[in-house]
Image (cartoon, helix red, strand yellow):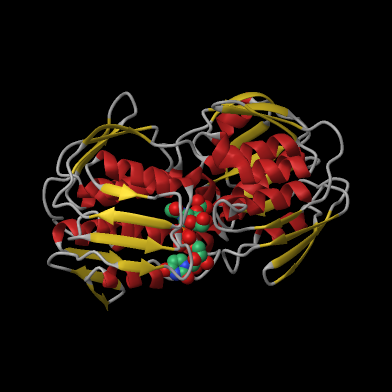
Amino acid sequence: MDKLVVAGGTSLQGRVAISGAKNASLAILCAAVMATELVTLENVPDIRDVQVMVEIIRSLGAQIHRTPGGSLRILMTGPPEEMPPYHLAKQLRASNLLLGPLVARFGRAEIPLPGGCNIGLRPMDLHFKGLIALGAQLSLERGTVIARATRLEGNRVYLDFPSVGATENIMMAACLARGQTVIENAAREPEVVDLANFLNCLGARVRGAGTDVIKIEGVDSLGGCLRYAVIPDRIEAGTFMVAAAATRGDVVLENVIPRHLEPLIAKLREAGVEVEEEEDRVRVRATGPLNPIDIKTMPYPGFPTDMQSQMMALLSTVPGTSVIVENIFENRFKVADELKRMGARIKVEGRLAVVEGVERLQGACVRATDLRAGAALVVAGLMAEGETHIGNTIYIDRGYFNLERKLKMLGARVWRTPLESDELVGKESAKKSASF
Ligand code: EPZ
């Protein structure tokens, strides 16, 4: 157990290379269990969530390992020897994305039902609605979701909400169903498109990903994929963009897809941040005072909920009143309490947060309550006067590869240090609750 220490006051300057997308990697790794031949993936970040997913897939009996060059190789030749153990699956709710692939290829899937987490209840009703529409029999036995099917049958599925995970689970399962499946009101996130492209690399027939109607023509089996490179992580990129703006710096982000960043770029420009877009990089500069803005999180291509906490940190020192509405998750303002410990003035009412900009934040001892809240506290620490000590770094390590090293290369004063003994007292309870 350690903590991240951030000494505020330096503006970020220089270049940073963005890693592969966590959320695309997790879905694509689940899809890889449907491949009957070797799959080689590039640009998969070696972050904690990926490490856990690799362990889960290995527990299914797959051969999976990283090559010395950093590629991930996966080969799943036959049905699972056993289902994912609870202690692994409960660490990573994305393990629920194995339901569709396993029941589609092997006729059976058993996945521990992921509980709620710090940002919301995270139900799976839309996942279940879709899989049942494709003919799977689902049951809940001792906290485990069991899906059974002899052969899935294509069908039309309407998603009451454009859920990313439900879209991905149903799309994967439909690849091996008999006949056509149409998913209506589908999620349009870039990670859904990346998954569809990977599935088509395996020989699937997916059309329309990125729009709200996805059509899948089922095939009998899927082959392998000699090389598939995962898209860059738009949320890691967004986090560095906000950190550059928050520290009034000048940073070039490399290995990005600017189109995926449009919602964030639009809001940063509205706040007075200069953003230059090039083919695979963006440059972010903020020199003068910034303007307060209003943000509403929405499904893609709306403003991403995964950037909401980081923007709250930035806006906490922008003079004036900014209003944030969180429309995706019911409990994603927890970071406000930690930011207020640093002197921020934020009033939360349900899904609404009103941020009154203050002159400067003060460094303090704070703790991450989820992955993006942790990132927001790093942004706040970079702006604050003095040192900020951030606990529960396990959350940050789930989604950010080499965060300190990348920040140090940009001039940040950030380091990791073991917790003092008196700080360990509360950590065991936090560790027990640290899963979603
Ligand atoms: C994915 O989660 C991402 N995770 C999340 O990123 C991201 O915040 C979220 O999409 C929204 O963009 C991965 O891809 C691994 P949803 P997911 O299903 O699929 C409700 C991060 O920080 N809902 O689109 O779980 C749900 O409660 C993580 O990287 C249902 O009601 O998100 C939520 O309110 C956090 N029933 C809303 O939809 C369902 O069956 C959006 O959830 C499914 C979802």
Where does residue 4 sit, x and y in percent of width and height? Answer: 61, 42
Q: Is residue 317 above or below residue 321?
A: above
Q: Is residue 27 above or below residue 224?
A: below
Residue 367 or residue 97, whichever sits in front:
97
* Count of numbered tags: 0
Where does residue 158 sit, x and y in percent of width and height? Answer: 40, 69
* Residue 426, image quadrant: bottom right
The answer to whether 34 appears left or right of 244 in the picture is left
Q: Is residue 124 above or below residue 317?
A: below
Residue 404 or residue 70, whichever sits in front:
70
Taking the spot 60% from the left edge, 67% from the top edge, the residue there is: 331
Taking the spot 54% from the left edge, 46% from the top edge, the residue there is: 396
Where does residue 12 sit, x and y in percent of width and height? Answer: 71, 29
Observer able to see residue 332: yes
The answer to whether 150 appears left or right of 3 in the picture is left
Where does residue 235 sit, x and y in percent of width and height? Answer: 55, 44
The answer to whether 301 appears left or right of 30 in the picture is right
Observer able to see residue 91: no
